[in-house]
Image (cartoon, coloured by chain):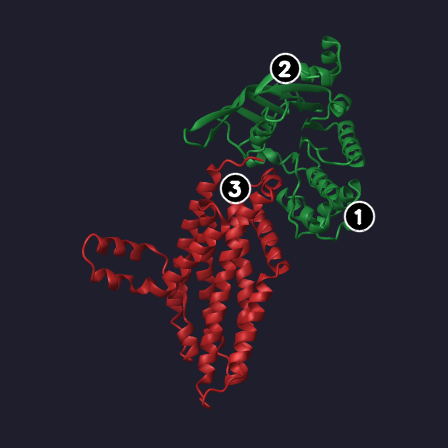
Amino acid sequence: MQHSPMHDGQRMTASEPILKIDNLRVEFRVAGLKEEVKVAVDGLSLTVNAGEVFGFLGPNGAGKTTTMNVLLGFVPPTSGSAYIFGTDVSQPIARQRIGYLPELTYYYRFLTPEELLRFYGRIFRIPKDQLEKRIDEVIKLVELEHARKRQIKTFSKGMQQRIGLAQAVLNNPDLLIFDEPTSGLDPIGRMKVREIIQRLKNEGKTVFFSSHEMGEVETVCDRVVIINQGKVREEGQVTDLLAKHQMNLEQIFLKLIGYQASV
Amino acid sequence: MMTNAMALAGVVVREMYRRKDFYVLLILTVIITLAMGSVNFFNDDKIVRYLKELCLLLIWISTLVMAISMAARQLPMERESRTIFPLLAKPISRGEVILGKFLGCWFACGLALLVFYVFFSVLTGVREHDLPVLSYFQAIWLHWMMLGIVTAMVILGSLIFAAPSSNATISFVVSAGILLLGRHLNKVALQMSEPSSTILYTIYYNIPHLEIFDVRDLIVHNQPPIEWGWWALATPYAAVYIAIFLFAACWIFKRKSLSA
């Protein structure tokens, strides 16, 4: 599968990080009697290198999804910057070589998986003959061959998540951004997603994903960052963190976010 | 830019023919027209004109309702169903999303118009044994241009008003108001005192005059087609308003923060 020619702004050397966030700050105005400013992300800096599986961890409301929203261009940063493949994330071309799987996947319910993938394939400018081949491959990968001509509105939640995975890998991306990819899935679905992440890792892809499943993170991630209240609490190789704290990742996570057991 | 916009437009057109709205409006138009056509009022030979007037009125109302309801739900539905997030995570700009949504709604309206006018042509052909193709072509084209202005206006409205229903209601009232009263505003302004007169003149000279695209009377009374020069001028007139509304929509949409 070929990629589109790289945009000038995307030229980068092998040593440059795939994803770079520099001193990112995101503020939201909270409507009310008195307008308040909520800081969702506060001075976040991190880099993700090629071929890494990077875990982005934090409790609910820590700023993970907001950071991902900035990376995908949904939300503008208040200050700081973010780059994907050396291109500012505000440029649509920065998203040519990424695949994104949102936490909750909803797709055009009146389309079939084939039609949906064909639509996204056109946006990625995948040539028609290659696109049909690629659609066959990804539908097979997520095991939806039997439902490829059925409208998505008839799909179960697990099937919709698999369609989400199919669209995320359709363009054979070099960077995958997964927002809690196993959230709400049954054990088989979780295992399938884990297998796909592992497979992508083996193919040398870079994966940036958030998750609450510490066992999963420990298994598949090379490096993690733990954030809380918009700030980085810890960052490093999974093996280094385990050695440093002498406890498992879940215990490290709970300790860093200041969780006190009540019983 | 056009590849992305056309891909998105294709999804909107597909949505139209997989939803029931269009079929309901078409069937209602056919049933009402045929029911009225079966009645013979006092053996009046001018019944065909009434029938044509009624059928065209139903076509205008149906297509206006369809264009407004379809355009009003596009962007709010993308956000509500969260399909906007996987879409914008692709190499597509927000401007292309606006353009794609507009083109999709406009093409869908064009297809619906063709179906409606085929029915109208069959009806009048059977009753009058005549088919003024040029007049009908002008009527469809001008009608489609008018729907383009309305569609672009509603897409802009969907970024301003909170609920699709309020946008649809306001847009319908504004469109119907312009169609019915637009041409008379200057006459009303002439009889008003200042500053009301200036305000009304400003409105008169700035609103898109949708009524200039309405050539139903010419069709009903079997008049010859309008001059092609005037017909051609109506197209850039519509294009200017469509561009203004779409630029405004892009400007607002680009500044909107979307939280997944």
- Palette colour of chain A: green
Helix, strand or loop under label 3: helix
Please provide percent x and percent y for residue B124.
Answer: 51, 80
Residue A79 in view here: yes
Residue for badge 1: A145
In the picture, the quarter occupied by the C terminus of chain A is top right
Q: Secondary structure at mark 2?
A: loop
Q: Which chain is red?
A: B
Identified by mark 1, the residue type is: Glu
Give the numbered dot on residue A176.
none
- Mark 2: give few (<14), some (14-19) or many (20+) Cα within 10 Å: few
Q: Are marks 2 and 3 on the same chain?
A: no
- Residue A184, by quadrant, is top right
Return the residue nearer the eye: B158 or A166: B158
Q: Amino acid at mark 2?
A: Gly
Residue A258 numbered tag: 2
| Dot 1 and dot 2 residues touching (CB under 8 Å) | no
Which residue is drawn at the image coordinates 43% and 86% (left, top)?
B46
Three-letter residue code for mark 3: Arg
Chain under disc 2:
A
A15 and B53: which one is in front? B53
Q: Secondary structure at mark 1?
A: helix
Mark 2 vs 3: CB contact within 8 A: no
The residue furthest bottom is B43
**Tag 3 residue:** B94
* Quarter occupied by residue B1: top right
Q: Is residue A62 above or below residue A114?
A: above
Q: CA distance from mark 1 to mark 2?
A: 46 Å
Kindly report the distance in space between the C-alpha atoms of the residues bearing marks 1 and 3: 33 Å
Quadrant containing the N terminus of chain A in the rendered view: top right
| Residue located at (41% from left, 78% from top) | B224
Q: Is residue B149 visible?
A: no
